């Protein structure tokens, strides 16, 4: 009989279970999740493993490399530790030869059930593949559908960007410096938050970004305006920006956008009450919008082409930078001035063909 889902049993287990026989293989085990949708996905993956002869797993060979040992070696080699801890907690001593596409798919669903495919790809598929490849395992990992995410190219026009920064500076000068830095460096908010003074050279107008989303370090050059803004606050060591992720930082940013629209600032709610946020036209603006604005301005006002944007180190390939080609109007659009306009006579005669 096919493998069936057994619902949670109150007082005994909150998780769903698998029970049944498929292709002669008997299964009776927990799905390790209380979500029916996740359990159903695992059930289908389990049947596929049985069809391929991968379940039940073969006994591990003595001293066989495991995910734990491979992950430790990966981190000791200086590679990124981001997301690795949670993956070690899931895979543990699982042999590397037992980790396949279905196993990775199940891990992604179990560890991150309510996130976008793009985040699952970043938090599971990419680091697991990196650990396996570092250990010499040859595997081609299929990414989840939609893993590239939605391409967002929203950017700020100069008057809007400057209005928000002025409002932020009035509320908190350090928030104003942070937004200026994002706007003129193209850094992500996470890169700015972890930036230390030891990596800033105002004399050379450079900032060294040690870690980034794609794990590629890079050097950023700052305009003189930003160096002059930072100079009075320079320190020998420590973080450049004191803001931490979440509450206080986001609240100041929210009020910068609200007050830039000419509205009164939002008040912090009393305990138990919800925050009342008025409708305002900068509600679509995020910290990352300033990064997109930098790339857009570099393309539109700085004259940087796609190869130039990639050369800054902000992206690994031209495909990611191509989204900003829309910012520079193609010369063919100059022909729009030739279109008929009201109040002007129009010559409908077709040009005579040229004689050969």
Image: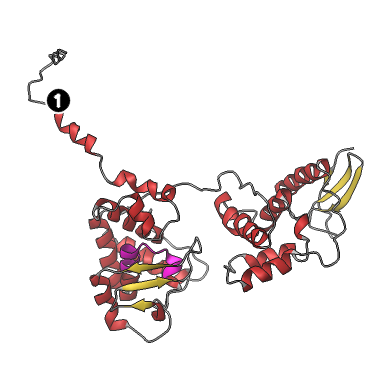
Does the magenta stretch mainly form a helix, a strand or a loop? Answer: helix
Q: Residue at x 64, y 56 (%)?
A: 129
The residue under the point 41% across, 85% down is 237
Disc 1 residue crowd, few under 14, some 14–19, many 20+, Cα 10 Å: few
Which range of residues does the magenta coloring cover? 179-192
Give residue 167's position: percent from left, percent from top.
Answer: 28, 67
Q: Which residue is mark 1?
A: 340
Per the image, label 1 sits on a secondary structure element best described as loop
Q: Is residue 156 magenta?
A: no
* Residue farthest toward the bottom in the current orientation of the protein: 236
Vertical arrangement, residue 353 with respect to residue 283, above or below: above
- Occupied quadrant, residue 266: bottom left
Residue depicted at x 64% and y 66%: 84
Does residue 29 appear left or right of residue 215 in this picture? right
Nearest the camera: 182 or 264?
A: 182
Residue 311 lies, in percent from the top left, at: 37, 58
């Amino acid at each position: 009989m096919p493998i069936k889902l057994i619902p949670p049993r109150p007082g005994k287990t909150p998780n769903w279970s698998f029970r049944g026989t498929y292709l002669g293989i008997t299964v009776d085990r927990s799905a390790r999740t209380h979500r029916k949708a996740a359990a159903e996905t695992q059930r289908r993956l389990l049947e596929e493993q049985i069809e391929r002869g991968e379940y039940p797993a073969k006994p591990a060979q003595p001293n066989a490399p495991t995910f734990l040992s491979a992950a430790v070696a990966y981190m000791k080699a200086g590679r990124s530790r981001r997301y690795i801890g949670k993956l070690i907690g899931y895979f543990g001593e699982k042999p590397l030869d037992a980790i396949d596409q279905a196993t990775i798919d199940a891990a992604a669903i179990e560890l991150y059930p309510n996130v976008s495919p793009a985040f699952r790809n970043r938090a599971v598929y990419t680091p697991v593949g990196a650990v396996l490849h570092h250990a010499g395992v040859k595997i081609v990992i299929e990414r989840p559908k939609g893993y590239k995410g939605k391409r967002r190219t929203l950017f700020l026009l100069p008057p809007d960007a400057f209005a928000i920064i002025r409002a932020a500076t009035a509320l908190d000068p350090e928030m104003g410096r942070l937004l200026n830095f994002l706007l003129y460096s193209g850094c992500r908010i996470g890169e700015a938050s972890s930036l230390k003074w030891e990596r800033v050279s105002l004399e050379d107008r450079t900032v060294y970004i040690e870690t980034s989303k794609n794990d590629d370090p890079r050097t950023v050059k700052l305009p003189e305006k930003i160096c002059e803004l930072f100079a009075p606050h320079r320190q020998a060591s420590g973080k450049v920006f004191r803001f931490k992720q979440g509450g206080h930082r986001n609240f100041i940013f929210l009020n910068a956008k609200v007050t830039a629209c000419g509205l009164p600032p939002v008040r912090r709610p009393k305990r138990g009450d919800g925050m009342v946020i008025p409708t305002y036209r900068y509600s679509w603006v995020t910290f990352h919008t300033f990064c997109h604005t930098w790339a857009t301005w570099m393309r539109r006002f700085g004259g940087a082409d796609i190869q130039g944007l990639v050369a800054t180190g902000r992206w690994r390939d031209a495909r990611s930078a191509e989204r900003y080609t829309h910012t520079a109007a193609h010369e063919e659009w100059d022909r729009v001035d030739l279109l008929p306009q009201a109040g002007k006579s129009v010559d409908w005669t077709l040009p005579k063909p040229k004689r050969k």
